[in-house]
Structure formats: structure tokens, C-alpha cells
């Protein structure tokens, strides 16, 4: 049975718990395409602000998520996708550096460019597999970033290239965003 069926069931579970999701929210939670492209269509070309970017050694949890060895070098990045001064999506990613070519690493490190645009720039053939969607309680940091008191919609997914996990991403936005 395809994994997508489970994702759709997760949307129904959220709605059965009383969360009224807009079509736009459902699209952002379930798409296996580029969220950047969807945001560009909805808002005009968006930008990102890198909040954190650092090289780390993968701990056991991240190694398991990425199917790599513990202590392998990864890039940890936290960005805020935004249009002008309006925050749209908060995203955290882990990328095993050994799976990236030099030029892609350089763009990832230097540029405030969404991962979807980097993949497109280098014609990287890949697919996305959604692993989880749900609701999380608000945090002080995200309350301040989004200026919203709402709980958070979230999704976790991997970008796969050549049957290897190239990127793990978690995207988060307030429940009162994208309600049209």
C-alpha cells in the first residue's frame, strides 16, 4: 500500500480531532513536490533567512534518520521562508555532506537559497517521501517569529536521490496561516 494513503489518513485524523484545515494547508502538508514553488505561486518569489547553519557529527538519532553512520559529518540548517517581512515556514534540515557534490555544498553553505531551488539549479533528480504530519504545541521561539499564538502544523520528509537520503526536512507553520 502506498505511503501516501497513510498521509491522507493522517490529514483525516487531524480533521476528526477538530482541526479545520484549508485546502492550502492540506497541499503544504501532503505535497511530494517543492514547497518553495507552492509558496512562490501563492506569494510571489519568496526568500529565506538562515537562522542557524553549522556542521555537526550525526548523533545516533540523526544517523538513523539519514541512514548514515554515527559521527558522520552533516550540515544542520534552520531557515525561515518569508515574503518581505512576513514569515511563512520555519524549516530545519539535516544533510549528510558525503552525499553532496562540491558545488552543491558551496551553494548550501553560502547562499540563502531554499533546498528546492538548489536541487533545481543543479538538475538533481530526486523524490520526496513524507514521513509524518501533525500538530505541535507552540514554542516561545516560534511564537515570536510568527507573531502567532496558534499551535503548529508540521511535516517531516526526506529527499531521496539515487535511493539514498539526501536531506531530512521538518517544516512548521502556525495553524492560523494559509487558511484561505
Image (spheres, rainbow, N blue to C red):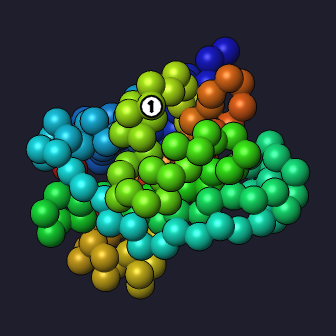
Q: Position of residue 67 (x, y in %)?
A: 80, 42
Of residues 65 and 174, the one nearer the viewer is 65
The 10 Å Cα crowd at callout 1, few under 14, some 14 to 19, many 20 or more, is few
Q: Where is 177 relative to 43, above or below?
A: below
User: Residue tagged by mark 1?
Assistant: 122
Q: Where is 147 relative to 26, above or below?
A: below
Q: Position of residue 52 (x, y in %)?
A: 49, 72
Q: Position of residue 154 (x, y in %)?
A: 46, 54
Identify the image quadrant of residue 126.
Answer: top right
Q: Is residue 97 left or right of residue 141?
A: right
Q: Position of residue 101 (x, y in %)?
A: 61, 39
Q: Where is 74 relative to 144, above or below?
A: above
Residue at image location 59% in from the left, 70% down from the top = 54
Q: Is residue 90 left or right of residue 145?
A: right
Q: Pick the quarter of the image with the N terminus.
A: top right
Residue at image location 21% in from the left, 51% down from the top = 46
Q: Pick the quarter of the image with the C terminus.
A: top left
Residue 50 at least partly seen = yes
Identify the image quadrant of residue 73.
Answer: bottom right
Residue 17 at least partly seen = no
Residue at image location 26% in from the left, 36% down from the top = 38
Q: Is residue 129 left or right of residue 136?
A: right
Of residues 76 and 65, the one nearer the viewer is 76
Identify the image quadrant of residue 138.
Answer: bottom left
Which residue is most to the front?
102
Residue at image location 55% in from the left, 50% down from the top = 105
Secondary structure at badge 1 equals loop
Q: Where is 122 relative to 102, above or below?
A: above
Q: Is residue 89 left or right of residue 131?
A: left
Query: How many numbered circles does the render carry?
Result: 1
Amino acid at each position: 500500500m502506498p505511503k501516501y494513503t497513510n498521509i491522507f489518513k493522517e490529514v483525516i485524523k487531524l480533521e476528526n480531532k477538530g482541526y479545520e484545515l484549508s485546502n492550502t494547508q492540506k497541499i503544504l502538508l501532503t505535497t511530494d513536490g517543492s514547497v518553495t514553488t507552492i509558496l512562490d505561486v501563492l506569494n510571489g518569489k519568496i526568500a529565506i533567512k538562515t537562522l542557524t547553519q553549522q556542521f555537526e557529527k550525526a548523533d545516533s538519532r540523526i544517523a538513523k534518520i539519514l541512514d548514515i553512520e554515527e559521527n558522520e559529518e552533516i550540515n544542520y540548517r534552520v531557515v525561515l521562508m518569508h515574503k518581505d517581512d512576513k514569515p511563512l515556514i520555519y524549516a530545519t534540515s539535516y544533510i549528510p555532506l558525503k552525499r553532496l557534490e562540491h558545488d552543491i555544498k558551496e551553494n548550501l553553505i553560502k547562499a540563502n537559497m531554499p533546498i528546492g531551488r538548489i536541487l533545481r539549479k543543479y538538475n538533481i533528480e530526486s523524490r520526496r517521501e513524507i514521513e509524518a504530519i501533525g500538530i505541535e504545541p507552540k514554542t516561545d521561539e516560534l511564537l515570536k517569529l510568527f507573531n502567532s499564538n496558534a499551535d503548529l502544523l508540521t511535516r517531516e520528509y526526506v529527499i531521496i536521490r539515487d535511493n539514498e537520503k539526501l536531506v531530512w526536512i521538518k517544516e512548521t507553520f502556525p495553524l492560523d496561516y494559509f487558511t484561505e
